[in-house]
Amino acid sequence: MEKRYDIIAALDINLDIIINAENTDLQFGQKEKMIAGYNFEMGGSSCIFASQAARLGLKAAGIGVAGDDLPGSLMVDKLKASGVITGHLRIDSSIKTGVSVILCKNGDRAILTYPGTNDGVFPQDFTDDLLKNSRHMHIGSYYLMKRLKPHYGNIVRKAKSFGLTISMDTNWDPDEKWNGEIWEVLPYVDIFMPNENEAMAIAGKDNIQDAVEKFEGIVPVLVVKRGKEGAAAYSGGREYFCRSLDVDVVDTIGAGDSFDAGFVYGFLSGYDIEKCLNIGSICGSMNTTKAGGTAGQVCKEKLAKMIKERD
């Protein structure tokens, strides 16, 4: 029976205000400085993931909370414009929408975040009806969504009982504790997609090879993102590698999340790991060509053309 949704994800709803401070010397003391420009963009790791998945034609549904405020309205509009199914979002006037002010300068960035609705999803939002009618669950911002973190073990066990496959990208732990609860979740994860530093921190290892070995036998597919160096995948005792595209990078906000969505799109399409890596690499690389997490995302038609050209 055809499922209502291809992907469901708990959304860390957060508006990014991106400031181009390239030629600005930031100072306190009430000193006003001019900036080169700014953008309001979709933030939130899982939001960016869902946006890219929807642009690739997947029926991606978000579970989340937005504040009854301007940032919340902008985020809901941006999710809808990307094609994300928003019927499971709640508007809550008692909480402010999460906002990040991102100061970009010299190829680096400083980020100031008010979490707000980032952590607005409750375990009971994953209803039996929602799980029964979904093919796949993606877990993002694991360490930021503290309401869900202690319950993800039960959530993924129930999801598996309904036949869902599961992908996970924890992102960075701001507390740098890398809590052991994740080891209750990982045995149910089909695709684990950290970057190199996250993989080593979670595994408690000081080199990537030891980290990879620790995850072997726990997750069927491990994908380690290496930024501009590309990405590697490990499955069934084999290692696969794919380079990133040679593009003019504007910023790297959301590149890893778009990579994740591309890889999962390939996985749900029944492609082999090499092709999934290639699709992920295209999505992640193209994301970097425009400011913000979603402006550079590719649609299904453009992806097909780029795959053909790359082959």
Image (cartoon, rainbow, N blue to C red):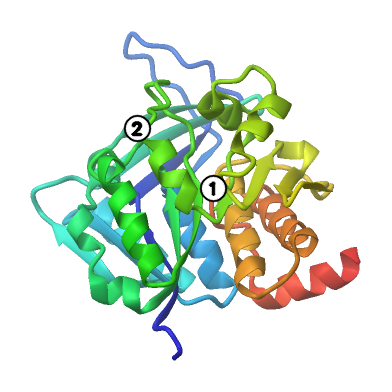
Residue 43 percent location from the top left of the image = 43, 48
The amino acid type found where label 2 is placed reads Thr
- Label 2 or label 1, whichever comes before in sequence order: 2
Q: Is residue 23 above or below residue 142?
A: above
Rendered residue at 56%/30% (across/down): 198
Residue 291 visible within the image: no
Is 38 positioned to the left or the right of 259 in the image?
left
Look at the numbered discs 2 and 1 and tell me whether their residues touch, using CB distance below 8 Å.
no
The amino acid type found where label 1 is placed reads Gly
Rendered residue at 44%/48% (across/down): 140
Residue 168 percent location from the top left of the image = 49, 49
Query: Residue at label 2?
Result: 113
Crowd tier of the residue under label 2, counting other residues whose Cα lies within 10 Å: few below 14, some 14–19, many 20 or above: some
Query: Residue at label 1?
Result: 292
Res. 120 mark:
none
Q: Is residue 85 above or below residue 98?
A: below
Q: Nearer the viewer, residue 212 or 311?
A: 212
The quarter of the picture where the N terminus appears is bottom left
Q: Give the quarter of the image for residue 303.
A: bottom right
Rendered residue at 53%/16% (across/down): 25
Under circle 1, the secondary element is: loop
Q: Give the quarter of the image for residue 129.
A: bottom left
The quarter of the picture where the C terminus appears is bottom right
Residue 265 visible within the image: yes
Residue closest to the far top: 29
Q: Is residue 168 above or below residue 195?
A: below
Residue 254 percent location from the top left of the image = 55, 47
Q: Nearer the viewer, residue 289 or 176?
A: 176
Q: Is residue 106 above or below residue 310?
A: above
